[in-house]
Amino acid sequence: MGEVIWTTLRLAGLTTVLLLILATPIAWWLARRRAWWKEVVAAVTTLPIILPPSVLGFYLLIAIAPASPLMAPLHAFGVRTLAFTFEGLVVGSMVYSLPFAVQPIRGAFEAMGPRPMEVAATLRASPLDAFFTVALPLSRRGFITAAILVFAHTVGEFGVVLMIGGAIPGKTEVISVRIYQLVESLQYGEAHRLAAGVVAFAFAALLALLLVDRRTDEAVR
Amino acid sequence: MSERAANPGVEGRFVGPLGGFRLDADFTLASSGITALSGPSGSGKTSLLRCIAGLARLPGQLHVGGEVWQDDRTFVPPHRRPVGVVFQEASLLAHLSVRGNLMYGARRTPARAQVGLDDTVALLGLAPLLDRAPGNLSGGERQRVALGRALLSQPRLLLMDEPLSSLDAGSKAEILPYLERLHRALAIPALYISHDAGEIARLADRVIYMRGGRIVAGEAPAPTLEGVDAERRDRLALAALRAGLEP
């Protein structure tokens, strides 16, 4: 049981860190561009919210299979496939939770508006300097929201991890999948303990989110 | 080059479409003193200021103190232009204290600072505000901080876009004496957008008028009404009337 929890937390933690790094430039671009077709990109990054996990899992499985053109560059490094590996789960979780990272960060950048970056420029800060010393601190609540959402959403995912991870103990078996297997084999006692833990965790995550929002409201006022 | 060295003020010209209209502005500023830029709303004053700061880009030329900021081949990006900008809304950086705001630009300029923190704080009466957050300041206090912040970035040109227009009468009355002190202490050219004839009379050495994206009259002496010819008096009366009409 400890192993399953550790795998889950490791997956959620790694997904959160990598996804915040990946989502930040996407969110910045979406927030600053005026072209209408940027919404096409926005729609693509939001798709995982609407798609059934089985659809997402199916395509992800094809994408990380040995025959996939996306995997071809990795063959040189001795990696043939990411299917049924922890690394594959991280990639899948990042795709699955992408909208939960992009939306809050984009919203924070949009709420900030272009003025603070202009102010920073007239105060001699280069665009990169201004991004780190002005845009990031002013948008920090968007990043906190994104981090909580991505972490919680990754802990809560089931369909995608089952399809591309295969529930290999110690490698790709996470809490949600273990609960499913426990229930299947009628081990309700242990299923209860894990499930209750997830409920408590989900409550704590939501409470944290609401408290962050509240502080944002106060800061705006 | 030698011509410019003899007159190291500001000269520039911007021509091109911007938003819904066409800017075609040819202007010069003397090497020191405040030049007011006046004219009806939507005449292109703010657009011209943004072009000078490098925040907007239109074809044209701009020379400041003998240096090229923009010509056919050059466009110096805003963060490499020694320009101080005070926006209509103070636009303080909300995550920094007053001191943090003042030092943001100062830290990013070369060491040979001509404008020091102590002098700026004294000039603008900022001492009691230094450790406060921008959110807890009055409108007038915020604009004083924005002004100090711009000065501490060691500009060679100061641009102010209606810095008083968003303030109530009380805050305006409170900040005007500081601006007059700044005017006396300032050794660089400054452009001050306003359509308040009273403000212009108190602060400006010269006035430029803009209408429909063009400069229609420039480099006239500041409007002290004595000795002003009839045509200019009419124009001033009109400007004052317009300022009164516009919220």
Image (cartoon, helix red, strand yellow):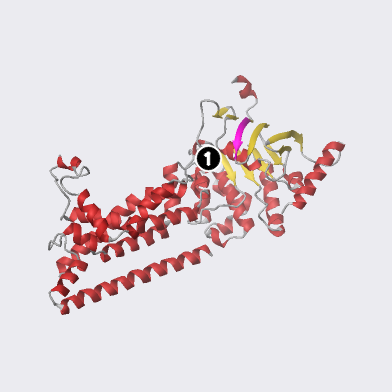
The chain containing the residue under callout 1 comes to B
Give the percent coordinates (x, y) of residue A21.
33, 51
Report the magenta residues as a range.
B12-18
Asked if residue B227 shows in the view, the reply is no
Q: Secondary structure at mark 1?
A: loop
- Secondary structure mostly seen in magenta is strand
* Relative to A54, residue A214 above or below: below
Residue at the far top in the pictured view: B2
Left or right of B127 in this view: A217:
left
Residue in the foreground of this view, choosing between A126 and A139: A139
Residue in the foreground of this view, choosing between A114 and B32: A114
Give the image quarter of residue B183: top right
Asked if residue B73 shows in the view, the reply is yes
* Residue ID at (59%, 55%): B142
Neighbours of disc 1 within 10 Å: few (<14), some (14-19), many (20+): few
* Residue ID at (62%, 31%): B15
Give the percent coordinates (x, y) of residue B62.
59, 30
Residue in the foreground of this view, choosing between B72 and B138: B72
* Relative to B203, residue A144 above or below: below
**Residue B17 belongs to magenta span:** yes
* Relative to B68, residue B193 above or below: below
Q: Name the quadrant of the N terminus of chain B.
A: top right
Give the image quarter of residue B173: bottom right
Q: Name the quadrant of the C terminus of chain B.
A: bottom right
Q: Which residue is mark 1?
A: B113
Q: Amino acid at mark 1?
A: Ala
Give the image quarter of residue A75: top left
